[in-house]
Image: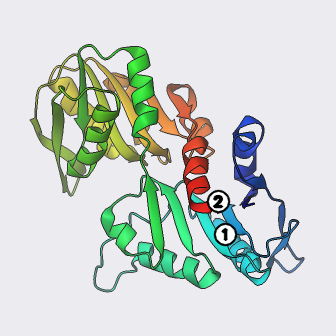
Amino acid sequence: MSIIFPLPQYRPLLSGELIERSTSVLGSCELDRFANGELYVRVGDPAAGRICAIWGSLAPPDEQILSVLALAHTLKREGARQVVALLPYLGYARQDRAEHGQSLGAAWAGDLLRAGGVDRVLTLDVHSSRAAACFPMQLDSLSPAALFAEVLTGRGLAGVSVVAPDDGAVERAEAVIRAAGMNGSALARLHKRRDANGVAHSSLTGAISSRAVIVDDILDTGGTLVSACAALRRAGAREIDVFVTHGLFTGERWRELPALGVRRIYATDSLPAARERGGEIVEVLPAGGLMLDAFAAIAS
C-alpha cells in the first residue's frame, strides 16, 4: 500500500473524508530543528518497498523546500521504492526563461528535487511548458478546469463571457469552456503588454457581455488582473468573477478588484493560506481530490 507524508501545514487538508476516500494511508513524520537551528526529519511509518508521497510545497519560505528535500532523502534511505512529490503549487515555476547571468529557478528546483531523491512530481496547473521542460523527472500537471466549471454551471451560464487575460491563459480558459459544456461560447482574449509602469492591456479580441469570468493560473500581486478588469469594464462588463488556480495575494494591488466589478475570487487550496490572505471576497475550492486520484493512478 502507498503512503502519503504531508508537511505540517498540509496535514489538515488530508484529514477526515478526503484521506478516507484514498487508497493510500496517511503517514506521520516529524520535522523539527536542533538547538543549533539545523533541520531534521523523523519518519514514523515504514517506507521500505513502498511508493511514498510527500505532500508539500516549494513556495517561500525556503524552509518548505528544505523540508521536502530532507523528507525525500530520508524516505529513500529508508528504502522507499518510489518517492513522488505532491506539490499543489509549484513554486519557482515562473522562473522559466533562461536569461544571461540570471538564475533559472524552475531548473534548479527540479535538480534539487532529483538530488533529494524525488522520482516524480505531481502538481496543479504548472505555469508553463517551459517550466515543465526544466524538470529532470516526470512532471504531471493537473487542470482545475472541472472544479471551476462546476462553480460556473451551478451559478448559471447564461450571458457569461469567458476571458483569458493574456495569451498564456488561453488554453486554461478554453479548458473551462469545454468542462462547463460551453463549447458554443466564444472565448474573449485580452492582449497584455508590459512597460515601465507595469502591466497594461492594449486590446480585446471577442465580445464581452455584462457578466464576465476571467480564468488564470496565479493571482500574485494582482497587477495583471487589475488591468484586465479595467479593460473589461471599458468593454461593458459590469459583474466579474475571477478563477485562479493559485491564490498568493501578495502586496496590495489585488485589493482594487472589488471596485472594478469583481464579485468573487475563486482559488484552489493549493496554498492553504489563500482564504486568510484574500479575505471575504475569496472562495477556496478543494483540489485534494484531484491530487489523490492522480496519485492513486500512479501508485496502482
- How many angstroms separate mark 1 from mark 2 (CA)? 7 Å
111 is higher (above) or lower (below) than 295: below
Q: Are marks 1 and 2 in contact (CB under 8 Å)?
A: yes
Image side of residue 248 versus residue 131, left or right: right
Foreground pick, 263 / 260 = 263
Q: Position of residue 195 (x, y in %)?
A: 18, 56
Disc 1 marks which residue? 68
**Callout 2: few (<14), some (14-19), or many (20+) C-alpha neighbours within 10 Å?**
many
Kindly indicate the quadrant of the structure image that contains residue 120: bottom right
Task: Indicate which disc residue 176 carries.
Answer: none
Q: Position of residue 201 (x, y in %)?
A: 17, 43
Task: Indicate which disc residue 56 carries.
Answer: 2
Image side of residue 177 versus residue 246, left or right: left
Look at 39% across and 75% down and name the residue there. Answer: 134
Image side of residue 93 versus residue 122, left or right: left
Give whichever of discs 1 and 2 has the lower sequence position: 2
**Residue 262 appears in the rendering:** yes
Look at 63% across and 45% down and name the residue there. Answer: 272
Look at 33% across and 61% down and name the residue there. Answer: 128
63 is higher (above) or lower (below) than 274: below
| Amino acid type shown at disc 2 | Gly
| Amino acid type shown at disc 1 | Val
Q: Position of residue 153 (x, y in %)?
A: 39, 20
**Residue 255 appears in the rendering:** no
Foreground pick, 160 / 50 = 50
Q: Position of residue 184 (x, y in %)?
A: 17, 26
Quarter of the picture holding the C terminus = bottom right
SS for callout 1: helix
Image side of residue 193 versus residue 53, left or right: left
**Callout 1: few (<14), some (14-19), or many (20+) C-alpha neighbours within 10 Å?**
many
SS for callout 2: loop
